[in-house]
Image (spheres, rainbow, N blue to C red):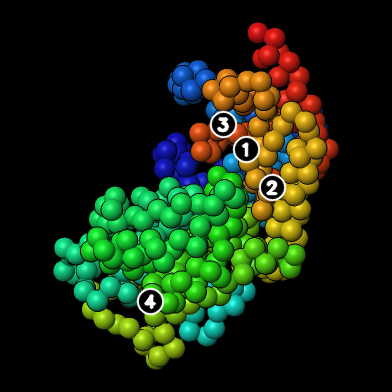
Amino acid sequence: MEKTLLQKAYSPEDFRTRGHHLIDQLADHLEAHMHDNSTKTLNWHLPEDERVFWGEFLENGNESELFGRILNRITAVHNPKCIGHQVTPTIPITALTAMMSALLNNGMAVYEMGMAPSAMERIVTDLLCKKIGYDEVSRGFLTSGGTLANLTALLSARKAVVKNDIWNDGHDQALGIMVSAEAHYCVDRAAKVMGLGENGIIKIPATPEFRMDTDILENEIKKAKAKGITVFAIVGSAPSTATGVYDDLEAIATFAQRHGLWFHVDGAHGGAAIFSEKYRHTVTGIDKADSVVIDGHKMMMLPTITTALLFKDGNHGQATFSQKADYLLVQSEDEDWYNKAKRTFECTKNMMSIHWYTIYKIYGEAIFDEYVTNLYDMGTAFGEIIAKEPNFELAISPNSNIICFRYVDTSLELSTLNEINAKLRQHLLEEGEFYIVQTKLRGIQYLRCTVMNPFTTTAHFKTLLNNIKSKLENILSH
Ligand SMILES: *Cc1c(COP(=O)(O)O)cnc(C)c1O
């Protein structure tokens, strides 16, 4: 009998066959990128060429080649020469949990729409709270990305600190948050979404070392008050994205306490340092934060997009979106921690918790320490290599696994140097051997590396540097 399209699409046998084949392809992909040093990180194509290719493939491509073609036309994050953005090479087991999440599709808005993942989410977020140094009233949840988590945290902050019921009544008073000028742009965006306006985002200038200048906080809040702005929160970066520099969380906590502000830590990138015995000191003071964001898809080896938002006092996380004041539910009989959508921005969401839980179960918490420590060690090591190079300089000695450096020649003007460094980066991208990125700090163009792969070594970095030098010769001779 002729099968309908739907019958074909839902055939368990078809899924089994394709699935086995794909797992083999993915394992081959890992092997090629992780164990064969000659495999390029990416094959560069211009956006328009790529669009044409996929348009053409949709028309005429052989269906059996689809997954293979995708594999050949991506940026391979598992390649140790992929040292660009803060994207983690996922632990392969999480590809399996991601597949489970996609197939089982338990959205978890309410408990019975995802019983196991809802319970696992409580367990995983409790473990994270404990690691931060929080106590029994602390609670968290998982949400779709650091951007959304930061917005949610600031909404919780406003609800908790500002006297008026803005959620229900709207606001006509001038409100503000304080944040380092070096913070991730999503904090700015969150503030704008909340209607704080440009004046409500009090950007604290950074020190020459790119850290929030906490010495001027008193003066800045005085200035804000004089303008009639009620400041309700301060955000610390752990670390900031461009430079990987950690703010002084302890100093910010003290300031926040003195002024009754909500203290939020954007640890999207480096909050996971709570797991590293060696680098835990980078987040000293994090336990004093009212809320903390940690991206699983950055420093915890989980698939995109998987973020934890953790509250020192879980009641605040409970109250963010509530119409009435249902405070003090945590640890009461009425605490329905298992109905997630009450607290999260999302209604339906991924079964993110199963990735975290699986890693805890199979490898244990120690793997996070190993990962973070290894990457931060490499950040330091790369920094030391650059520091020894006469024609290169660091923006800042690395605090983490993010390294910003550039080619310098004192006889050249800044604009020429910026051009040369931008060209270098473009040439590297087009070659595709290594993947690194770039950033502009205070008008200066830098090459930027983030070590996300625990198998990237100083040998890779030295090869990259030699590669850069030969490209320089070429650029400078033209
Ligand atoms: C990456 C990053 C974000 C944004 O997180 P997404 O998960 O990409 O939305 C926010 N803050 C910092 C410090 C980051 O590094």
Look at mark 3 in the image and give the residue it sits on.
445
Query: What is the distance, in whole Å, between disc 1 and disc 2 at their CAs?
Result: 13 Å
Q: Are marks 2 and 3 in contact (CB under 8 Å)?
A: no
Q: Are marks 1 and 3 in contact (CB under 8 Å)?
A: no
Q: Which mark is residue 165?
A: none
Q: Secondary structure at mark 2?
A: loop
Q: Which amino acid lies under the numbered mark 1 shown in the image of this protein?
A: Arg
Q: Which amino acid lies under the numbered mark 4 shown in the image of this protein?
A: Gly
Residue 202 in sight in this render = yes
User: Residue at (69%, 35%) from the top-left corner?
Assistant: 393
* Image location (x, y in percent) of residue 77: 65, 40
**The C terminus - image quarter:** top right
Look at mark 1 in the image and give the residue it sits on.
448
Q: Nearer the viewer, mark 1 or mark 2?
A: 2
Look at mark 4 in the image and give the residue it sits on.
260
Q: Which amino acid lies under the numbered mark 3 shown in the image of this protein?
A: Gln
Query: What is the distance, in whole Å, between disc 1 and disc 3 at their CAs?
Result: 10 Å
Against 99, is 325 above or below?
below
User: Residue at (76%, 53%) from the top-left corner?
Assistant: 377
Front in this rendered view, residue 275 or 25: 275
Q: Secondary structure at mark 4?
A: loop
Chain-order first, disc 3 or disc 4? 4
Query: What is the distance, in whole Å, between disc 1 and disc 4 at their CAs?
Result: 37 Å
Label 3 CA crowd tier, 10 Å (few <14, some 14–19, many 20+)? many
Q: Which amino acid lies under the numbered mark 2 shown in the image of this protein?
A: Ser
Look at mark 2 in the image and give the residue it sits on.
397
Q: Secondary structure at mark 3?
A: strand
